[in-house]
Image: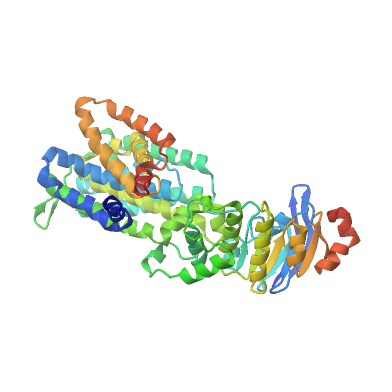
Protein backbone atom coordinates (compact mmCIF):
# COMPACT_ATOMS: atom_id res chain seq x y z
CA UNK A 1 0.00 0.00 0.00
CA UNK A 2 2.59 2.53 1.18
CA UNK A 3 6.20 1.50 1.25
CA UNK A 4 9.03 3.69 2.48
CA UNK A 5 12.65 2.75 1.87
CA UNK A 6 15.86 4.44 2.94
CA UNK A 7 14.09 7.69 3.75
CA UNK A 8 16.51 10.34 4.98
CA UNK A 9 15.95 13.98 5.84
CA UNK A 10 18.82 16.26 6.71
CA UNK A 11 18.44 19.84 7.92
CA UNK A 12 22.00 21.08 7.39
CA UNK A 13 24.16 18.96 9.66
CA UNK A 14 21.15 17.66 11.61
CA UNK A 15 19.87 14.29 10.44
CA UNK A 16 16.19 14.22 11.43
CA UNK A 17 15.30 10.99 9.63
CA UNK A 18 17.96 8.44 8.76
CA UNK A 19 17.51 5.51 6.43
CA UNK A 20 13.93 4.88 7.55
CA UNK A 21 12.06 1.85 6.23
CA UNK A 22 8.35 1.48 6.87
CA UNK A 23 5.62 -0.58 5.23
CA UNK A 24 1.90 0.02 5.71
CA UNK A 25 -0.29 -3.01 5.00
CA UNK A 26 -3.70 -2.38 3.41
CA UNK A 27 -6.40 -1.77 6.01
CA UNK A 28 -4.10 -1.84 9.03
CA UNK A 29 -3.83 0.66 11.84
CA UNK A 30 -0.14 1.20 12.27
CA UNK A 31 1.03 3.02 15.40
CA UNK A 32 4.17 5.13 15.23
CA UNK A 33 5.61 5.97 18.61
CA UNK A 34 8.85 7.37 19.91
CA UNK A 35 10.27 10.00 22.23
CA UNK A 36 10.01 13.72 21.50
CA UNK A 37 12.28 14.66 18.63
CA UNK A 38 12.44 11.12 17.28
CA UNK A 39 11.10 12.33 13.91
CA UNK A 40 7.45 11.22 13.99
CA UNK A 41 5.93 14.43 12.66
CA UNK A 42 8.83 14.83 10.22
CA UNK A 43 7.99 11.39 8.83
CA UNK A 44 4.37 12.44 8.26
CA UNK A 45 5.54 15.72 6.73
CA UNK A 46 7.81 13.82 4.33
CA UNK A 47 5.05 11.43 3.25
CA UNK A 48 2.51 14.22 2.72
CA UNK A 49 4.84 16.50 0.78
CA UNK A 50 5.34 19.21 3.36
CA UNK A 51 9.05 18.38 3.26
CA UNK A 52 11.14 16.95 0.44
CA UNK A 53 13.37 14.05 1.53
CA UNK A 54 17.14 14.24 1.11
CA UNK A 55 17.20 10.61 -0.01
CA UNK A 56 14.91 7.60 -0.18
CA UNK A 57 11.68 6.53 -1.83
CA UNK A 58 8.04 6.63 -0.79
CA UNK A 59 6.18 4.20 -3.03
CA UNK A 60 2.40 4.53 -3.25
CA UNK A 61 0.26 2.82 -5.88
CA UNK A 62 3.42 1.88 -7.79
CA UNK A 63 4.70 5.44 -7.90
CA UNK A 64 7.46 7.21 -5.99
CA UNK A 65 5.68 10.19 -4.43
CA UNK A 66 8.70 11.57 -2.56
CA UNK A 67 8.98 15.31 -3.11
CA UNK A 68 5.52 15.74 -4.67
CA UNK A 69 3.39 18.65 -3.43
CA UNK A 70 0.85 18.27 -0.59
CA UNK A 71 -1.92 19.07 -3.09
CA UNK A 72 -0.83 16.27 -5.45
CA UNK A 73 -0.40 13.77 -2.64
CA UNK A 74 -3.81 14.60 -1.16
CA UNK A 75 -5.37 14.08 -4.59
CA UNK A 76 -3.64 10.70 -4.90
CA UNK A 77 -5.60 9.50 -1.85
CA UNK A 78 -3.41 10.26 1.16
CA UNK A 79 -5.03 12.39 3.85
CA UNK A 80 -3.65 13.70 7.11
CA UNK A 81 -4.64 15.30 10.36
CA UNK A 82 -2.51 17.74 12.33
CA UNK A 83 -0.94 17.90 15.76
CA UNK A 84 -2.29 21.44 16.11
CA UNK A 85 -5.84 21.10 14.85
CA UNK A 86 -6.41 22.79 11.48
CA UNK A 87 -9.83 24.02 10.44
CA UNK A 88 -11.67 27.03 8.99
CA UNK A 89 -12.77 29.01 12.05
CA UNK A 90 -15.63 30.96 10.45
CA UNK A 91 -17.22 28.08 8.57
CA UNK A 92 -19.82 25.58 9.70
CA UNK A 93 -19.01 21.89 10.10
CA UNK A 94 -21.25 21.21 7.09
CA UNK A 95 -19.22 23.53 4.88
CA UNK A 96 -15.97 21.91 6.04
CA UNK A 97 -17.26 18.51 5.03
CA UNK A 98 -18.62 19.80 1.73
CA UNK A 99 -15.26 21.36 0.85
CA UNK A 100 -13.49 18.15 1.76
CA UNK A 101 -15.99 16.02 -0.20
CA UNK A 102 -15.95 17.88 -3.50
CA UNK A 103 -13.34 17.36 -6.19
CA UNK A 104 -10.67 19.94 -5.37
CA UNK A 105 -9.30 19.96 -8.89
CA UNK A 106 -12.52 21.58 -10.11
CA UNK A 107 -12.12 25.28 -9.68
CA UNK A 108 -14.05 28.35 -10.74
CA UNK A 109 -15.69 26.60 -13.71
CA UNK A 110 -17.42 24.18 -11.36
CA UNK A 111 -19.88 27.01 -10.68
CA UNK A 112 -21.25 26.44 -14.17
CA UNK A 113 -22.15 22.81 -13.50
CA UNK A 114 -24.96 21.46 -11.29
CA UNK A 115 -24.23 21.43 -7.58
CA UNK A 116 -23.52 17.94 -6.29
CA UNK A 117 -25.58 16.93 -3.28
CA UNK A 118 -23.32 15.58 -0.52
CA UNK A 119 -25.95 15.73 2.24
CA UNK A 120 -26.13 11.99 2.85
CA UNK A 121 -22.36 11.53 2.84
CA UNK A 122 -21.85 14.52 5.14
CA UNK A 123 -24.41 13.21 7.62
CA UNK A 124 -22.83 9.76 7.62
CA UNK A 125 -19.35 11.14 8.24
CA UNK A 126 -20.64 13.47 10.95
CA UNK A 127 -22.12 10.46 12.69
CA UNK A 128 -18.89 8.46 12.41
CA UNK A 129 -16.88 11.41 13.74
CA UNK A 130 -19.34 12.10 16.60
CA UNK A 131 -20.37 15.45 15.14
CA UNK A 132 -24.02 14.74 14.40
CA UNK A 133 -26.07 17.61 15.69
CA UNK A 134 -23.16 19.99 15.19
CA UNK A 135 -23.32 20.26 11.41
CA UNK A 136 -24.52 23.85 11.42
CA UNK A 137 -22.18 25.03 14.16
CA UNK A 138 -19.38 27.39 13.20
CA UNK A 139 -16.03 25.65 13.81
CA UNK A 140 -14.62 28.27 16.15
CA UNK A 141 -17.56 27.64 18.50
CA UNK A 142 -16.83 23.90 18.82
CA UNK A 143 -15.01 22.50 21.84
CA UNK A 144 -11.39 21.48 21.38
CA UNK A 145 -12.41 17.86 21.30
CA UNK A 146 -15.03 18.50 18.63
CA UNK A 147 -12.48 20.43 16.59
CA UNK A 148 -10.28 17.31 16.71
CA UNK A 149 -13.21 15.22 15.51
CA UNK A 150 -13.77 17.77 12.73
CA UNK A 151 -10.15 17.38 11.64
CA UNK A 152 -10.72 13.62 11.41
CA UNK A 153 -14.10 14.07 9.67
CA UNK A 154 -12.56 16.29 7.01
CA UNK A 155 -9.99 13.64 6.18
CA UNK A 156 -12.73 10.99 5.93
CA UNK A 157 -14.74 13.21 3.58
CA UNK A 158 -11.78 13.23 1.18
CA UNK A 159 -12.34 9.49 0.61
CA UNK A 160 -8.66 8.70 1.06
CA UNK A 161 -7.04 5.28 1.01
CA UNK A 162 -4.31 6.14 3.47
CA UNK A 163 -4.67 8.47 6.48
CA UNK A 164 -1.82 9.78 8.58
CA UNK A 165 -2.88 10.98 12.02
CA UNK A 166 -0.54 13.26 13.93
CA UNK A 167 -1.46 12.96 17.61
CA UNK A 168 -5.25 12.72 17.18
CA UNK A 169 -5.80 12.69 20.95
CA UNK A 170 -3.51 15.62 21.86
CA UNK A 171 -5.12 17.89 24.44
CA UNK A 172 -8.20 15.68 24.88
CA UNK A 173 -9.62 14.60 28.22
CA UNK A 174 -10.26 10.99 29.12
CA UNK A 175 -13.79 10.74 27.72
CA UNK A 176 -12.85 12.55 24.50
CA UNK A 177 -9.88 10.21 24.05
CA UNK A 178 -12.29 7.32 24.47
CA UNK A 179 -14.44 8.86 21.73
CA UNK A 180 -11.40 9.06 19.45
CA UNK A 181 -10.79 5.37 20.11
CA UNK A 182 -14.38 4.58 19.16
CA UNK A 183 -14.10 6.65 15.98
CA UNK A 184 -10.98 4.73 14.97
CA UNK A 185 -12.67 1.43 15.72
CA UNK A 186 -15.51 2.44 13.40
CA UNK A 187 -12.97 3.31 10.69
CA UNK A 188 -10.95 0.12 11.14
CA UNK A 189 -10.56 -1.86 7.95
CA UNK A 190 -11.88 0.91 5.72
CA UNK A 191 -8.62 2.82 5.54
CA UNK A 192 -4.92 2.22 5.93
CA UNK A 193 -3.88 4.37 8.88
CA UNK A 194 -0.63 5.54 10.41
CA UNK A 195 -1.20 6.94 13.89
CA UNK A 196 1.43 9.01 15.67
CA UNK A 197 0.34 9.28 19.29
CA UNK A 198 1.86 9.82 22.72
CA UNK A 199 -0.99 8.13 24.58
CA UNK A 200 0.57 4.67 24.64
CA UNK A 201 -2.58 3.00 25.99
CA UNK A 202 -4.56 4.37 23.06
CA UNK A 203 -1.93 3.24 20.53
CA UNK A 204 -1.80 -0.23 22.08
CA UNK A 205 -5.57 -0.54 22.01
CA UNK A 206 -5.87 0.59 18.40
CA UNK A 207 -2.85 -0.62 16.49
CA UNK A 208 -2.50 -3.83 14.54
CA UNK A 209 1.24 -3.14 14.47
CA UNK A 210 3.46 -0.56 16.11
CA UNK A 211 6.75 0.88 14.91
CA UNK A 212 9.07 2.62 17.33
CA UNK A 213 11.04 5.55 16.01
CA UNK A 214 14.27 6.52 17.72
CA UNK A 215 16.77 9.10 16.48
CA UNK A 216 15.17 9.16 13.05
CA UNK A 217 15.25 5.39 12.43
CA UNK A 218 12.86 2.53 13.09
CA UNK A 219 13.96 0.64 16.18
CA UNK A 220 11.46 -2.17 15.86
CA UNK A 221 8.11 -3.05 14.30
CA UNK A 222 5.63 -5.63 15.48
CA UNK A 223 2.35 -6.41 17.22
CA UNK A 224 1.67 -4.12 20.22
CA UNK A 225 2.20 -6.86 22.82
CA UNK A 226 5.65 -7.66 21.42
CA UNK A 227 6.76 -4.08 20.98
CA UNK A 228 5.92 -2.93 24.50
CA UNK A 229 7.82 -5.89 25.92
CA UNK A 230 10.92 -5.12 23.83
CA UNK A 231 13.77 -4.28 26.23
CA UNK A 232 15.26 -1.51 24.05
CA UNK A 233 11.84 0.09 23.59
CA UNK A 234 11.33 0.04 27.35
CA UNK A 235 14.66 1.73 27.80
CA UNK A 236 14.47 4.46 25.12
CA UNK A 237 10.78 5.24 25.14
CA UNK A 238 8.72 3.75 27.91
CA UNK A 239 11.34 4.76 30.50
CA UNK A 240 11.19 1.45 32.34
CA UNK B 1 -43.59 34.49 14.88
CA UNK B 2 -43.94 38.22 15.47
CA UNK B 3 -44.41 40.57 12.55
CA UNK B 4 -40.96 42.10 13.09
CA UNK B 5 -39.30 38.70 13.16
CA UNK B 6 -41.23 37.67 10.07
CA UNK B 7 -40.11 40.84 8.32
CA UNK B 8 -36.52 40.19 9.34
CA UNK B 9 -36.68 36.65 8.06
CA UNK B 10 -38.23 37.72 4.78
CA UNK B 11 -35.61 40.34 4.07
CA UNK B 12 -32.54 38.52 5.27
CA UNK B 13 -33.01 34.82 4.64
CA UNK B 14 -34.34 35.05 1.13
CA UNK B 15 -32.59 36.69 -1.75
CA UNK B 16 -35.79 38.55 -2.66
CA UNK B 17 -34.64 41.52 -0.64
CA UNK B 18 -32.13 42.17 -3.41
CA UNK B 19 -34.96 43.38 -5.60
CA UNK B 20 -35.63 46.24 -3.19
CA UNK B 21 -32.37 48.18 -3.70
CA UNK B 22 -32.40 47.40 -7.43
CA UNK B 23 -35.94 48.77 -7.74
CA UNK B 24 -35.08 51.83 -5.65
CA UNK B 25 -32.11 52.52 -7.90
CA UNK B 26 -34.30 51.98 -10.97
CA UNK B 27 -36.80 54.63 -9.92
CA UNK B 28 -34.16 57.09 -8.75
CA UNK B 29 -34.21 59.16 -12.00
CA UNK B 30 -37.92 59.76 -11.48
CA UNK B 31 -37.46 61.39 -8.12
CA UNK B 32 -34.19 63.24 -8.33
CA UNK B 33 -32.38 65.92 -10.27
CA UNK B 34 -29.68 65.54 -12.91
CA UNK B 35 -26.76 66.55 -10.71
CA UNK B 36 -27.56 64.00 -8.06
CA UNK B 37 -28.11 61.38 -10.73
CA UNK B 38 -24.64 61.91 -12.19
CA UNK B 39 -23.20 61.38 -8.69
CA UNK B 40 -25.39 58.30 -8.24
CA UNK B 41 -24.06 56.91 -11.55
CA UNK B 42 -20.51 57.23 -10.26
CA UNK B 43 -21.54 55.78 -6.90
CA UNK B 44 -23.01 52.65 -8.51
CA UNK B 45 -19.87 52.11 -10.60
CA UNK B 46 -17.64 52.66 -7.57
CA UNK B 47 -19.81 50.11 -5.77
CA UNK B 48 -18.82 47.55 -8.41
CA UNK B 49 -15.21 48.64 -7.96
CA UNK B 50 -15.51 47.96 -4.21
CA UNK B 51 -16.94 44.49 -4.91
CA UNK B 52 -13.97 43.76 -7.15
CA UNK B 53 -11.55 44.67 -4.37
CA UNK B 54 -13.56 42.57 -1.92
CA UNK B 55 -12.93 39.47 -4.06
CA UNK B 56 -9.17 39.81 -3.54
CA UNK B 57 -9.06 41.34 -0.08
CA UNK B 58 -12.16 39.99 1.60
CA UNK B 59 -12.71 36.61 -0.03
CA UNK B 60 -9.25 35.21 -0.61
CA UNK B 61 -7.17 37.49 1.64
CA UNK B 62 -4.89 39.08 -0.95
CA UNK B 63 -4.19 42.55 0.39
CA UNK B 64 -3.63 44.48 -2.79
CA UNK B 65 -2.68 48.14 -3.09
CA UNK B 66 -3.12 48.10 -6.85
CA UNK B 67 -6.91 48.39 -7.36
CA UNK B 68 -6.70 51.95 -8.71
CA UNK B 69 -4.09 50.81 -11.23
CA UNK B 70 -6.56 48.32 -12.72
CA UNK B 71 -9.43 50.82 -12.46
CA UNK B 72 -7.27 53.24 -14.44
CA UNK B 73 -6.28 50.58 -16.96
CA UNK B 74 -9.98 50.11 -17.72
CA UNK B 75 -10.60 53.85 -18.03
CA UNK B 76 -7.57 54.39 -20.26
CA UNK B 77 -8.46 51.40 -22.46
CA UNK B 78 -11.76 53.02 -23.41
CA UNK B 79 -10.35 56.55 -23.68
CA UNK B 80 -7.37 55.52 -25.79
CA UNK B 81 -9.50 53.72 -28.35
CA UNK B 82 -12.12 56.46 -28.57
CA UNK B 83 -9.95 59.58 -28.34
CA UNK B 84 -6.76 58.58 -30.13
CA UNK B 85 -7.95 55.94 -32.56
CA UNK B 86 -11.50 57.13 -33.15
CA UNK B 87 -12.57 53.59 -32.50
CA UNK B 88 -15.89 52.36 -31.12
CA UNK B 89 -16.58 53.02 -27.45
CA UNK B 90 -17.79 49.45 -27.13
CA UNK B 91 -14.44 48.02 -28.18
CA UNK B 92 -13.01 49.65 -25.06
CA UNK B 93 -14.67 47.07 -22.82
CA UNK B 94 -13.11 43.92 -24.31
CA UNK B 95 -9.83 45.83 -24.49
CA UNK B 96 -10.12 46.73 -20.79
CA UNK B 97 -10.85 43.10 -19.91
CA UNK B 98 -8.03 41.60 -22.00
CA UNK B 99 -5.48 44.16 -20.81
CA UNK B 100 -6.45 43.65 -17.17
CA UNK B 101 -6.25 39.85 -17.47
CA UNK B 102 -2.84 39.96 -19.15
CA UNK B 103 -1.35 42.49 -16.72
CA UNK B 104 -2.90 40.79 -13.68
CA UNK B 105 -1.41 37.43 -14.69
CA UNK B 106 1.99 38.99 -15.36
CA UNK B 107 2.00 40.88 -12.07
CA UNK B 108 0.32 38.28 -9.87
CA UNK B 109 1.75 34.97 -11.05
CA UNK B 110 5.24 35.32 -9.55
CA UNK B 111 4.30 36.68 -6.11
CA UNK B 112 1.40 34.24 -5.67
CA UNK B 113 3.30 31.16 -6.88
CA UNK B 114 6.34 32.04 -4.82
CA UNK B 115 4.15 32.73 -1.75
CA UNK B 116 6.06 35.86 -0.93
CA UNK B 117 3.94 36.57 2.14
CA UNK B 118 1.45 39.27 3.09
CA UNK B 119 3.86 42.14 3.70
CA UNK B 120 5.81 41.63 0.49
CA UNK B 121 2.60 41.22 -1.49
CA UNK B 122 1.32 44.54 -0.13
CA UNK B 123 4.61 46.24 -0.99
CA UNK B 124 4.76 44.61 -4.41
CA UNK B 125 1.27 45.75 -5.37
CA UNK B 126 1.98 49.21 -3.95
CA UNK B 127 5.07 49.44 -6.16
CA UNK B 128 3.04 48.31 -9.16
CA UNK B 129 0.29 50.83 -8.42
CA UNK B 130 2.74 53.72 -8.07
CA UNK B 131 4.60 52.62 -11.19
CA UNK B 132 1.45 52.57 -13.31
CA UNK B 133 0.39 55.96 -11.96
CA UNK B 134 3.77 57.51 -12.76
CA UNK B 135 3.79 55.78 -16.12
CA UNK B 136 0.77 57.85 -17.17
CA UNK B 137 2.70 61.05 -16.42
CA UNK B 138 5.86 59.87 -18.12
CA UNK B 139 4.30 58.66 -21.36
CA UNK B 140 2.47 61.70 -22.73
CA UNK B 141 2.54 60.23 -26.26
CA UNK B 142 0.56 57.24 -25.03
CA UNK B 143 -1.56 58.45 -22.16
CA UNK B 144 -1.75 62.21 -22.62
CA UNK B 145 0.40 62.77 -19.51
CA UNK B 146 -1.07 64.95 -16.80
CA UNK B 147 -3.81 66.18 -19.16
CA UNK B 148 -5.03 62.65 -19.66
CA UNK B 149 -7.08 61.46 -22.60
CA UNK B 150 -10.25 63.34 -23.39
CA UNK B 151 -12.75 64.47 -24.30
CA UNK B 152 -15.03 61.49 -24.66
CA UNK B 153 -18.68 60.73 -24.06
CA UNK B 154 -20.68 57.56 -24.27
CA UNK B 155 -22.19 56.89 -27.72
CA UNK B 156 -25.70 56.30 -28.91
CA UNK B 157 -27.12 52.82 -28.44
CA UNK B 158 -30.32 51.70 -30.20
CA UNK B 159 -31.12 55.35 -30.79
CA UNK B 160 -30.63 56.30 -27.13
CA UNK B 161 -28.02 58.95 -26.50
CA UNK B 162 -25.99 57.53 -23.64
CA UNK B 163 -24.03 60.76 -23.25
CA UNK B 164 -27.06 62.18 -21.43
CA UNK B 165 -27.29 61.71 -17.68
CA UNK B 166 -30.42 59.59 -17.36
CA UNK B 167 -29.68 57.10 -20.16
CA UNK B 168 -26.11 56.62 -18.93
CA UNK B 169 -27.38 56.10 -15.40
CA UNK B 170 -29.59 53.27 -16.62
CA UNK B 171 -26.83 51.85 -18.77
CA UNK B 172 -24.40 51.87 -15.82
CA UNK B 173 -27.04 50.41 -13.50
CA UNK B 174 -27.78 47.60 -15.94
CA UNK B 175 -24.08 46.86 -16.49
CA UNK B 176 -23.35 46.84 -12.75
CA UNK B 177 -26.37 44.65 -11.96
CA UNK B 178 -25.35 42.16 -14.66
CA UNK B 179 -21.65 42.01 -13.68
CA UNK B 180 -22.36 42.02 -9.93
CA UNK B 181 -25.12 39.44 -10.44
CA UNK B 182 -22.73 37.10 -12.25
CA UNK B 183 -20.11 37.58 -9.56
CA UNK B 184 -22.64 36.97 -6.80
CA UNK B 185 -23.79 33.79 -8.46
CA UNK B 186 -20.18 32.66 -8.86
CA UNK B 187 -19.21 33.50 -5.29
CA UNK B 188 -22.36 31.89 -3.89
CA UNK B 189 -21.28 28.60 -5.42
CA UNK B 190 -18.70 26.29 -3.83
CA UNK B 191 -16.07 28.52 -5.40
CA UNK B 192 -16.88 31.30 -2.92
CA UNK B 193 -16.35 28.84 -0.06
CA UNK B 194 -13.09 27.70 -1.60
CA UNK B 195 -11.87 31.31 -1.53
CA UNK B 196 -13.12 31.93 2.02
CA UNK B 197 -11.51 28.71 3.24
CA UNK B 198 -8.23 29.53 1.49
CA UNK B 199 -8.13 32.83 3.35
CA UNK B 200 -8.93 31.18 6.68
CA UNK B 201 -6.48 28.29 6.46
CA UNK B 202 -4.48 27.90 3.30
CA UNK B 203 -2.38 25.03 4.66
CA UNK B 204 -5.46 22.92 5.45
CA UNK B 205 -6.81 23.57 1.97
CA UNK B 206 -3.62 22.25 0.38
CA UNK B 207 -3.89 19.04 2.38
CA UNK B 208 -7.49 18.68 1.23
CA UNK B 209 -6.10 18.63 -2.30
CA UNK B 210 -6.74 22.23 -3.33
CA UNK B 211 -4.21 24.08 -5.44
CA UNK B 212 -4.46 27.27 -3.40
CA UNK B 213 -1.96 29.13 -5.58
CA UNK B 214 -4.21 28.56 -8.55
CA UNK B 215 -7.35 29.62 -6.66
CA UNK B 216 -5.64 32.80 -5.44
CA UNK B 217 -4.38 33.63 -8.90
CA UNK B 218 -7.86 33.18 -10.39
CA UNK B 219 -9.39 35.39 -7.68
CA UNK B 220 -6.68 37.99 -8.24
CA UNK B 221 -7.27 38.08 -12.01
CA UNK B 222 -11.04 38.18 -11.51
CA UNK B 223 -10.69 41.07 -9.07
CA UNK B 224 -8.39 43.02 -11.40
CA UNK B 225 -10.69 42.41 -14.37
CA UNK B 226 -13.79 43.67 -12.57
CA UNK B 227 -11.83 46.72 -11.33
CA UNK B 228 -10.94 47.38 -14.96
CA UNK B 229 -14.57 47.01 -16.08
CA UNK B 230 -15.56 49.51 -13.37
CA UNK B 231 -12.90 51.93 -14.65
CA UNK B 232 -14.14 51.48 -18.22
CA UNK B 233 -17.70 52.29 -17.12
CA UNK B 234 -16.54 55.23 -15.01
CA UNK B 235 -14.55 57.16 -17.61
CA UNK B 236 -17.64 58.33 -19.53
CA UNK B 237 -18.93 59.98 -16.33
CA UNK B 238 -15.86 62.24 -16.08
CA UNK B 239 -15.18 62.45 -19.85
CA UNK B 240 -11.41 62.27 -19.37
CA UNK B 241 -9.07 59.41 -18.42
CA UNK B 242 -6.57 61.16 -16.19
CA UNK B 243 -3.87 59.97 -13.78
CA UNK B 244 -6.16 60.76 -10.84
CA UNK B 245 -8.15 57.62 -11.76
CA UNK B 246 -5.02 55.61 -10.90
CA UNK B 247 -4.01 57.58 -7.83
CA UNK B 248 -3.13 55.84 -4.59
CA UNK B 249 -5.80 57.91 -2.84
CA UNK B 250 -8.44 55.99 -4.80
CA UNK B 251 -6.90 52.69 -3.69
CA UNK B 252 -6.98 53.93 -0.09
CA UNK B 253 -10.58 55.01 -0.44
CA UNK B 254 -11.83 51.75 -1.94
CA UNK B 255 -9.97 49.73 0.70
CA UNK B 256 -11.71 51.72 3.43
CA UNK B 257 -15.10 51.20 1.75
CA UNK B 258 -14.48 47.45 1.72
CA UNK B 259 -13.56 47.41 5.42
CA UNK B 260 -16.53 49.58 6.39
CA UNK B 261 -18.90 47.45 4.31
CA UNK B 262 -17.52 44.20 5.71
CA UNK B 263 -14.69 42.09 4.30
CA UNK B 264 -15.83 39.17 2.19
CA UNK B 265 -19.49 40.13 2.41
CA UNK B 266 -20.02 41.18 -1.23
CA UNK B 267 -22.94 43.59 -0.64
CA UNK B 268 -21.29 45.46 2.23
CA UNK B 269 -18.51 47.02 0.14
CA UNK B 270 -21.05 48.04 -2.53
CA UNK B 271 -23.27 49.64 0.08
CA UNK B 272 -20.37 51.49 1.71
CA UNK B 273 -18.96 52.72 -1.61
CA UNK B 274 -22.36 53.87 -2.82
CA UNK B 275 -23.38 55.57 0.42
CA UNK B 276 -20.06 57.27 1.08
CA UNK B 277 -19.74 58.57 -2.50
CA UNK B 278 -23.16 60.21 -2.20
CA UNK B 279 -22.22 61.46 1.25
CA UNK B 280 -18.98 62.94 -0.11
CA UNK B 281 -20.84 64.94 -2.76
CA UNK B 282 -23.19 66.41 -0.17
CA UNK B 283 -20.39 67.14 2.26
CA UNK B 284 -18.35 68.77 -0.51
CA UNK B 285 -20.85 71.59 -0.63
CA UNK B 286 -20.62 72.44 3.06
CA UNK B 287 -17.31 71.07 4.31
CA UNK B 288 -14.99 70.34 1.35
CA UNK B 289 -12.11 68.92 3.39
CA UNK B 290 -14.33 67.04 5.80
CA UNK B 291 -14.85 63.87 3.80
CA UNK B 292 -11.42 62.35 4.25
CA UNK B 293 -11.44 63.21 7.94
CA UNK B 294 -14.79 61.52 8.43
CA UNK B 295 -13.72 58.56 6.26
CA UNK B 296 -10.59 58.15 8.39
CA UNK B 297 -12.60 58.32 11.60
CA UNK B 298 -15.12 55.78 10.27
CA UNK B 299 -12.28 53.48 9.27
CA UNK B 300 -10.85 53.56 12.79
CA UNK B 301 -14.27 52.96 14.36
CA UNK B 302 -15.01 50.01 12.08
CA UNK B 303 -11.60 48.41 12.52
CA UNK B 304 -11.75 48.57 16.30
CA UNK B 305 -15.46 48.35 17.09
CA UNK B 306 -17.15 46.73 14.10
CA UNK B 307 -14.51 44.67 12.31
CA UNK B 308 -17.18 42.70 10.45
CA UNK B 309 -18.49 45.95 8.93
CA UNK B 310 -21.98 47.09 8.04
CA UNK B 311 -23.03 43.60 7.00
CA UNK B 312 -21.90 42.21 10.35
CA UNK B 313 -24.00 44.90 12.02
CA UNK B 314 -27.03 43.92 9.90
CA UNK B 315 -26.47 40.24 10.65
CA UNK B 316 -26.49 40.96 14.36
CA UNK B 317 -29.74 42.85 13.88
CA UNK B 318 -31.16 39.87 12.00
CA UNK B 319 -30.10 37.49 14.73
CA UNK B 320 -31.75 39.80 17.28
CA UNK B 321 -28.54 40.43 19.23
Q: Residue furthest front?
A: B2
User: Can residue B73 be seen in the rendering of this structure?
Assistant: no
Left or right placement of residue A166 versus residue A212 in this view: left
Q: Residue at x 29, y 57 (%)?
A: B15
The chosen color scheme is rainbow
Left or right placement of residue A109 versus residue B284 in this view: right
Query: Residue B299: which quarter of the image?
Result: top left
User: Can residue B26 be seen in the rendering of this structure?
Assistant: yes
Count all numbered tags in the image, as a single digit: 0
Give residue B57's position: percent from left, percent from top: 42, 46
Left or right placement of residue B56 versus residue A81 in this view: left
Give residue B69's position: percent from left, percent from top: 35, 42
As rendered, which of B107 and A100 lies closer to the eye? A100
- Please, is residue B292 above or below residue B116 in the view? above
Give residue A131's position: percent from left, percent from top: 55, 62
As rendered, which of B259 and B219 lies closer to the eye? B259
Q: Quadrant of the C terminus of chain B?
A: top left
Q: Quadrant of the N terminus of chain B?
A: bottom left
Give residue B315's position: percent from left, percent from top: 36, 48
As rendered, which of B290 and A12 lies closer to the eye? B290
Query: Residue B152: which quarter of the image?
Result: top left
Q: Residue furthest left?
A: B159
Left or right placement of residue B136 versus residue A156 in this view: left
Amino acid sequence: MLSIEGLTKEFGSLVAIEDLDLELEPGEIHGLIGPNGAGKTTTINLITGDLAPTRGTIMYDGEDIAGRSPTDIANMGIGRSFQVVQYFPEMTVRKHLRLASRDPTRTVLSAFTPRTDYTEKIEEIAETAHLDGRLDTVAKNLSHGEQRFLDIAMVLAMDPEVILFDEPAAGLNHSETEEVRQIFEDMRGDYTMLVVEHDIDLVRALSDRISVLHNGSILTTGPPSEVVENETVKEVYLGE
Amino acid sequence: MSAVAELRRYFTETKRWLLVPVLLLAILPLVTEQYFLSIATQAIILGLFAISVDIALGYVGLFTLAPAAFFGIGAYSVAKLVVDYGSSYWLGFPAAIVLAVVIAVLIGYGPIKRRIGLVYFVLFTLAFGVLVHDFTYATTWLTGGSNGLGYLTAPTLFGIDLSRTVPYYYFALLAVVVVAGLLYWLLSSDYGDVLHATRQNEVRMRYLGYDTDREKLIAWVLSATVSSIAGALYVATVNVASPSLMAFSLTGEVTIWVVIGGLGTFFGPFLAAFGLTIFESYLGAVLPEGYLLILGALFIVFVFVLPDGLVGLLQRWRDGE
